[in-house]
Image (spheres, rainbow, N blue to C red):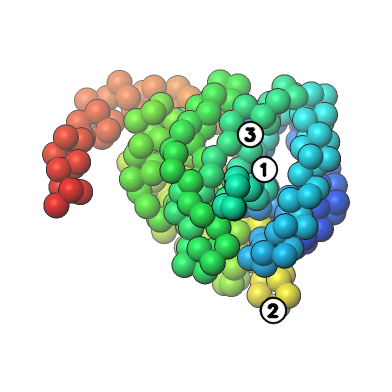
Amino acid sequence: MIVAAVSSKSRIGDVEFNLSTTMDWIKSFDAQGVDFILFPELNLSGYIRDIEILKTVLLEKEALFTSLMEISKNTNSAFAVGFPEQEREKYFITHFVFDGGKIIGKHRKTHVSITEKEVYSEGDEINVFPVKEMLVGIQICYETHFPEISAIQAQKGANVLAMAFASPKETCQDKIERFKRYIPARAYDNSCFAMICNQVTTNKRGTVFPCASLIIDPKGKVLSESFVEENEFAVANIDFHAINRIRESKMAYFNAHKRTEWLREYYKS
């Protein structure tokens, strides 16, 4: 399976530009035989924390998703994209998975940051989605700092952790070095591949969101990385036999020996 994590450029509130950029990436990777493409958090809307801009962007959802389903129907690549979602009076940061002209799954961010809570509510489901030969667990930015989410997704069968970010500040180099300090542990501890990409933008305050894309194998080894805006993606051919070998090992597959009943009692105390 060939996978790509794209630190695509986004403009806040400019759905037309963001869709055009996303579709160009999908067409390019589809021509290269890529099976699954991960895009950053809220890549289709830009990283919005202004309620009025959010309301305006949501008016474009129907036309936007019609275009995405059409390109999904006409390409072999599956892809996961970020766009806000509204349910009654609540707003969510959501990632949608497209394949074969359909939305085959969606993940609402379960842990939002302090500043995001001014606008967004938290989702309450942790799922995995069958994509081609993969079982993908999606995590959105702040969620990646809670290792229990990766463990739950692995328990549900995930073999790929797809982590979409809109993380500001730092240089591209500093951002990817920080990712490499903790995300390899999520992959290693749960015997999963991990994909990471950050949204590239500059908000109205002049805050920069730097390029950083990364693909990690189940032993925590970096397979592909990019942290320069002229080459915004990481791409790798991932071999699930590596996971099978780990799971057949008596010592290397940690989740098989986790005392989940004891841990549940610990968290209650």
Residue 175 figure quarter: bottom right
- Asked if disc 2 and disc 1 are in contact, CB closer than 8 Å, the reply is no
Q: Along the polypeptide, which appears first: circle 2 or circle 3? A: 3
Q: Secondary structure at mark 3?
A: strand
Estimate how packed mark 3 is, as few (under 14), some (14 to 19) or many (20 or more) residues with alpha carbons within 10 Å.
Answer: many
Rendered location of residue 242, percent (x, y): 43, 27
On-image quarter of the N terminus: top right
> Is residue 176 at all visible to an observer of this figure?
yes
- Give residue 192's position: percent from left, percent from top: 43, 35
**Residue 12: % across, % down:** 75, 62
Q: Which residue matches tag 2?
A: 205
Note whether 182 is above or below 61 in the view shown. Answer: below
- Do the CB atoms of the residues marked 1 and 3 lie less than 8 Å apart? no
Q: What is the C-alpha distance between the residues marked 2 and 3?
A: 31 Å
Residue at the (38%, 33%) spot, across then down: 154
Residue at label 1?
A: 81
Kindly report the distance in space between the C-alpha atoms of the residues bearing marks 2 and 1. 25 Å
Q: Which residue is mark 3?
A: 97
Q: Position of residue 7 (x, y in %)?
A: 67, 53
- The residue positioned 41% from the left and 26% from the top of the image is 157
Element at label 1? strand
- Secondary structure, mark 2, is loop
Mark 1: amino acid = Val
Type of the residue with mark 2: Arg
- Give whichever of discs 1 and 3 has the lower sequence position: 1
Query: As rendered, which of 224 and 58 lies closer to the eye?
Result: 58
**Relative to 161, 96 lies left or right:** right
Task: Please tell me which residue is depicted at 79% across the width and 24% down the height of the picture.
Answer: 73
